[in-house]
Image (cartoon, rainbow, N blue to C red):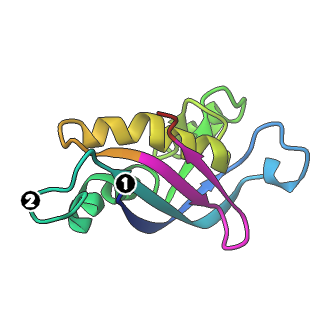
Amino acid sequence: MGTTKAIRYHDFSYGHRVHNHESKCANLHGHNGRVTFTVEAPELDAVGRVMDFSVIKELLCSWLEENWDHKFLAWRNDPMAVKLKSLDPTVVEVPFNPTAENMAKYLVETVGPARLNGTGVTLVHVIFEETRKCSCSYELKV
């Protein structure tokens, strides 16, 4: 027997720097990224869906819009974070070095459970495209 999953992507823009990166990504820079959310449920709803695509947009895509879109993400342990925040209070301090890998993991392990709580649906996989050529994925182990 197979598993049905619902998949929706969302495009957003953000800035970051990767602390201790050995190359140019250690500099302040930005991306037009794409996050592809994959959700699943133990069974389909009465209509025959894992979750309506508009609800995925409302719960997950809107989180990206409100929290990371057109924001600069700075790791709270980065020595530049305090200075950046003093220059621009909209800088978002995150609890991880903002690599695509860490961002994907945070979405699956932290944002997904919080936003989907009580729905019976689980965010099981994220593909995080930093650029059209470079992406990573993080999958929930069950």
Q: Element type at marker 2?
A: loop
Q: In x, y percent, where is residue 15?
A: 61, 56
Q: Which residue is mark 2?
A: 46
Name the residue rendered at 71%, 48% in the picture.
17
Q: In x, y percent, where is residue 93?
A: 53, 36
Q: In x, y percent, where is residue 50?
A: 25, 57
Is 99 part of what is drawn in magenta?
A: no
Left or right: 121, with 88 as reference point = left
Please report the bounds of the magenta region as a residue range. 124-139
| Closest to the observer, 18 or 49 | 49
Question: What amino acid is at disc 1?
Answer: Met
Are the residues at dot 2 and dot 1 in contact (C-beta closer than 8 Å)? no
Whole-Å distance between the Cαs marked 2 and 1? 19 Å
Name the residue rendered at 43%, 67% in the picture.
10
In this rendering, does residue 113 appear at all? yes
Left or right: 131, with 63 as reference point = right
Query: Residue 1 got which mark?
Result: 1
Q: Is residue 18 above or below residue 34?
A: above
Q: Element type at marker 1?
A: loop
